[in-house]
Image: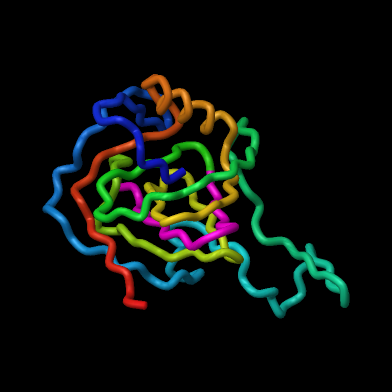
Amino acid sequence: MGMTTAAPGMRCCHARDALLNCEIEEISMPTSRAVPVEVLSDAAFEPFGWVLGQPHPLEKNPLEFRSPATDFWHEHFFDPGTGGDTEVLWVAYRDATSPISRLEVHHLTQQAVIPLRGDIIQILCLSDDNQAPDLSTLRAYQVSPGIGICMRPGVWHTTRAADATCMMLTRRSTTADLVDHLNHASPARESTLLEIPPHDLIRKAG
C-alpha cells in the first residue's frame, strides 16, 4: 500500500506457500544509489503489473459500449487471490522524502493504485528466488490522475507524493492484517515490510 510509517523492529511475516513470521531485516547491499523517475508505459511496467486508463483501444473490444454520450470498456479483471474479497480503499499520501529505505510486499493479492488528486511516484522491484527484494530491478514511475496501475502479487513497492489522494483496490483480509500489524505490532501474515539500503530518487527538472 506504500505505507512508510511502521516502527523499526516490528515483526513481520513472509508468506507464499507457508505463512511464517520473520524479523524486519536489512538487505546486505551497497550503499545509496540513484533511481531515476521514469515515464510510465505498458512495456516498462509489464514486469510489475498493468497500466490502467490507457486511451480507448481502436480495435473492437467485446466488453465495451460506445455512444455519442458515453463510452465504457473492459480495462482489467482484478484478482484478490484465492478466497479473497476485493476492497476499495481511499489513501492519502503526503511523504515526498528521498532516499527510499523501506519497501513492502503483499503476498496474496494484486493491488491497484489510481490517483484522484495529485501525482504519485510509485517505486517497485521484483522478488528474487528467496522472495526478497531484487534491488537490481528497482524502478520508479510517475503516475498522474487519469491513469492507474495494478501490481502483481509479490511485487515490492512504496509510494511517494507531496499531497495526493488515491483510490486503491486490494484484498480485505490483507488490509485488516496490515492495519493490525501497524497499529498493534502484531505479526503480519499477508504482507512483509523490509528495510533496504537507501536509494535516492532522481526527478527530472521541471
Asked if residue 67 is among those painted magenta in the image, a careful observer would answer no
In this picture, which residue range is highlighted in magenta?
110-128
At 35% across and 67% down in the image, what residue appears? Answer: 37
At 50% across and 37% down in the image, what residue appears? Answer: 108
Asked if residue 116 is among those painted magenta in the image, a careful observer would answer yes
Q: Position of residue 186 (x, y in %)?
A: 39, 19
Q: Quadrant of the C terminus?
A: bottom left
In the foreground, 198 or 149: 198
In the foreground, 41 or 15: 41
- Residue 36 lies in what quarter of the image? bottom left
Q: Position of residue 72 (x, y in %)?
A: 78, 65
Q: Main secondary structure of the magenta part?
A: strand
Give the answer, above or below, for where 126 lies relative to 24.
below
Q: Residue furthest bottom?
A: 58
In this rendering, the count of numbered labels is: 0
- Residue 84 lies in what quarter of the image? top right
Q: Position of residue 129 (x, y in %)?
A: 29, 44
In the foreground, 164 or 133: 164
Q: Position of residue 57 (x, y in %)?
A: 69, 75
Give the answer, above or below, for where 63 lies relative to 165.
below
Q: Residue furthest right?
A: 68
